Image (spheres, rainbow, N blue to C red):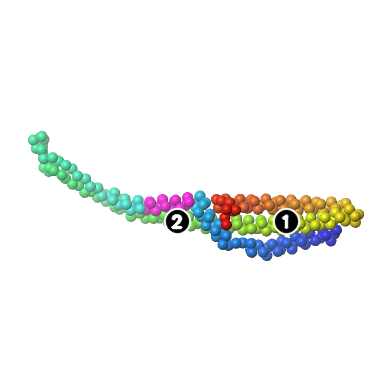
Amino acid sequence: MRYAVFLIPLFLITLTTHAQESLSKDVDYAYLEKLIAITRANYPKIKMYDDRVTVAEYAIKKAKLSYFDIFNFSYLYSPNNNTATISPTLLSGYQLGFFVNIGAILQKPSMIKQAKGELSVMQHDKEAFDLNMVAEVKKRYFTLIQKRAIFKVRSNAVLDVESMVANVKKRFEMGQETLEKYNQILVMQTDHYQNLLNAESEILIAKSSLEELLGQKLEDIK
């Protein structure tokens, strides 16, 4: 029994070491790039940054088109009817006027420059958020891979403990093992079951966290 109990931590250490060595092999980088592309297409905050850039681009166009606002055309029509007026005007017929707002001319270059600066800021914000988003998708994907590997390790440990329980139970029934040792191995089995449930729960949480960014279920992504 002492020998069997000693094998448990040794077995777990071996499995953990194997999981650490093989964890990177479980990462599918092509699949990860697909997850990043899906997040870019679906995540609402990314669309928000796209809309901000679009609005800033329209602001530049609007500022450029507003150059026409500095010019003003007008006309006045004075009919030639001296008999109806006491003081007839010197000019009669159509009179055209052309006005230029000098102050507006001086302001337009700075307004366009400001609009371009706001567009640049929006683009930098979008680029920064995209980098953060990519890093977050990778982090959550790697976390999911890690949780799956831990679940596999604990699942194998449970199988090993179940084999030990069967062996100790048989020895106990034959009178070759004490009740105390039998109870110890049963408690160990319960602990491993609890660890396995915790690992499964952590997988579901990691999966849900990744799907939050994707906007769809992982099962729908091939």
Q: Which residue is mark 1?
A: 155
Image coords of residue 93 (percent x, y) = 13, 43
| Magenta stretch contains residue 52 | yes
Query: In the shown orientation, is residue 205 left or right of residue 99?
Result: right
Q: Residue at x 57, y 55 (%)?
A: 221
Q: Secondary structure at mark 2?
A: helix
Q: Mark 2 or mark 1, which is nearer the start of the sequence? A: 2
Query: In the shown orientation, is residue 76 left or right of residue 38?
Result: left
Q: Which residue is situated farthest in the right direction here?
A: 175
Q: Looking at the picture, which amino acid does disc 2 mark?
A: Gln
Quarter of the image with the N terminus is bottom right
Real-space CA distance between mark 1 and mark 2, rounded to the nearest whole angstrom: 48 Å
| Magenta stretch contains residue 187 | no
Q: Which residue is mark 2?
A: 123
The magenta span reads: 47-60
Frontmost of labels 1 and 2 is 1
Q: Which residue is situated farthest in the left direction here?
A: 83
Image coords of residue 50 (percent x, y) = 45, 53
Q: Residue at x 35, y 53 (%)?
A: 61
Image coords of residue 68 (percent x, y) = 28, 51
Quarter of the image with the C terminus is bottom right
Front-most of 172 and 116?
A: 172
Q: Looking at the picture, which amino acid does disc 1 mark?
A: Ser
Secondary structure mostly seen in magenta is helix
Mark drawn on residue 71: none
Image coords of residue 55 (percent x, y) = 41, 50
Q: Secondary structure at mark 1?
A: helix
Q: Residue at x 18, y 43 (%)?
A: 76
